[in-house]
Amino acid sequence: MAKYERPHKKNRRFLTVNQHVFPLACIARFADADGRVSLHDLARSVERRAKPDDDIFCAKRAWDQRTERGMKKTEDEFQRLASKVIEGVLLEIGEAEKGVVDHFYALWHMRARHRTLPSQEIQLNGVTGGGGLTRDQEETVEIKGGSFMRSGGKFVARHVNGIRLQMLSGDYADELQHKTRWGFIRAESGEFVVPDVPAHLMIPLTPRLCLISGGASGTIRQSNVAEINRIVRAASLEYFFARDLSSCPF
């Protein structure tokens, strides 16, 4: 992974550097009384407590500011829906709510797969122009939603990644629209694990509540929770987390 580009002059334009893959508000619902979750770091084979704003949950300027800003509507709509499900106000995911879940899952799915950049610049074939902007001017363009080219025909990778991320998540949401129904399940006992890379159609909302494809809602036994957790653990690449991993059956 290429080292990320640090903002100029102490980030006086407030460009987002730490970009959550799974939203901070979603992670916070799994926090304990101390405001931390229980995280298993697969690369280091250790378990530790982590705050929802821990760097491990974040990409580092992997997409541009326009993309980051554009994702907020999808996240906000999902958070409102999640709150209604958790509070018991929303009892089923109907057609009106399905699109919100589809778009959120597609966004999480694609962000998890585009959180790193192999390089910070992409050389365009046959292009030698561009450039002329100072770092300060580049950031002015980015914060206003634009993109730019650097000297020698080099395009900033986070802009390309942002465009790709928006296109892929939109296409995947459209695909989900035609083949997926959502319901929610509650754990009778035991707690759910959250993956770093979602590979199955499920979105844990709280330690004991999870959105899942299939449409049917209800309460599941600990053995079913264990089956789901094994699937989630197997799909995770760098980490998985929960409120308390010792309460999660496998």
Image (cartoon, rainbow, N blue to C red):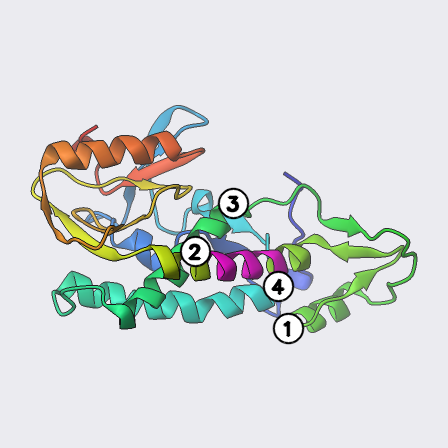
Q: CA distance from mark 4 to mark 3?
A: 26 Å
Q: Earlier in the sequence, mark 1 or mark 2?
A: 2
Location of residue 101 in the rendering, given as x and y in whole percent from the top left corner: 33, 61
Determine if residue 154 is in view.
yes
Mark 3 vs mark 1: give the one in front: 3
Q: Amino acid at mark 1?
A: Gly
Location of residue 145 in the rendering, given as x and y in whole percent from the top left corner: 64, 73
Badge 3: residue crowd in 10 Å (few <14, some 14–19, many ≥20): few
Mark 1 vs mark 4: give the one in front: 1
Q: Residue at x 74, y 67 (%)?
A: 138
In the picture, measured across the screen, residue 19 lies left or right of residue 154, that is left
Quarter in which the C terminus is drawn: top left
For mark 4, what is the residue? Answer: 11
For mark 2, what is the residue? Answer: 106
Q: Amino acid at mark 3?
A: Arg
Q: CA distance from mark 2 to mark 3?
A: 11 Å
Majority SS type along the magenta span: helix
Mark 2 vs mark 3: give the one in front: 2
Residues rendered magenta in the picture: 163-172
For mark 1, what is the residue? Answer: 145
Q: Earlier in the sequence, mark 4 or mark 3?
A: 4
Q: Amino acid at mark 2?
A: Ala
Q: Earlier in the sequence, mark 3 or mark 1?
A: 3
Mark 1 vs mark 2: give the one in front: 2
Q: Residue at x 92, y 56 (%)?
A: 128
